[in-house]
Every structure is written in structure tokens, then in C-alpha cells.
Image: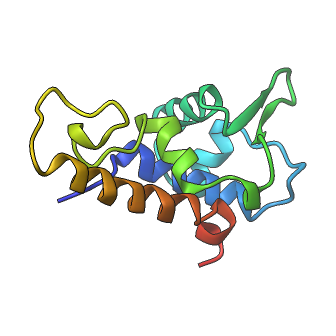
Amino acid sequence: MLRITKITDYGFILLAHMANQDESLLHNAKDLSATIEIPLPTVSKVLKILTQGGILKSHQGSKGGYTLSKSAHKISTAEIIEAVEGPVAITECSTADGCERDCPVSSSWQKVNTAVIGALQGLTLADMANS
């Protein structure tokens, strides 16, 4: 079974909440934790990962917080997953480099992986937040 991690799932929940707010509004970990009911240490961890991945911008200072790095309509689900989990790959041999085995199923897995990535690239954070 293919699954994203709980951290990625929490990332989508946090980002969807942020996408449904005024884009200029700053969000802090404490308020997000209370509103969405995800433990503060987890929220802090996810926000840090999403910032490092370029999905969020961090604003320092006493009134600081986080904002989306760009419009929710311009952030794909593929970008979010890659920011948290790394490149999307159904199997090891479906990555661009492939795997060390030269087997008959490798090219088929690469086709499947390409289709999955295409679907994820076609779905934006705005789509996820408004569904």
C-alpha cells in the first residue's frame, strides 16, 4: 500500500488552513496547534520542514510567523510531498536514476511513477484546501 507519512498529512492540514486565510496573515505555531489540534512540537517540526522546503516563508520578530511562499494556486501537491518526503518514487527503480537491477519491470514502474507525479503536479494546494 502506498502512503504518505503522518508528518506530510499534518503538513497538508496546516497548509490547507493557511490557504483558506488571508494570504498576508502571519501564522504562528502556537495558534496553529490550538486551532487545528495538532501537538505544538509536531506543528513546529512541520513548519520548519515546509520552510526548509520552500513552501513557507518564515518572518522573524515578536509579531513573526509563517506565510505561504506563493499563492496556494501555484503550489502543487507534488511540491509539498517532495518538500517533506523527498522525490516522489513509487519504487526505487522508478526514480530518474533507476536502480542497480536491469529488470523488465523497471521501465513500467517509471511510467507509473511519471503518471503519479503528473497527477500530483496537476493538483494544487488551493484544490486540496477547497475540496
Instruction: Please name the residue shown 56% across and 58% down the image.
Output: 121
Q: Horizontally, is 104 left or right of 38 in the view?
A: left
The single residue placed furthest to the right in the displayed view is 24
Task: Decide: is 130 above or below 14.
Answer: below
The single residue placed furthest to the bottom in the displayed view is 131
Task: Decide: is 49 above or below 117.
Answer: above
Q: Position of residue 95 (x, y in %)?
A: 33, 38
Q: Horizontally, is 75 left or right of 95 in the view?
A: right
Instruction: Please name the residue shown 34% across and 54% down the image.
Output: 113
Task: Decide: is 131 above or below 63.
Answer: below
Task: Decide: is 95 above or below 52.
Answer: below
Instruction: Please name the residue shown 22% across and 39% down the image.
Output: 93
Q: Position of residue 96 (x, y in %)?
A: 37, 36
Give the position of the N terminus as an image quadrant.
bottom left
Q: Position of residue 42 (x, y in %)?
A: 46, 36
Q: Horizontally, is 4 left or right of 103 in the view?
A: right
- Location of residue 125 by image quarter: bottom right
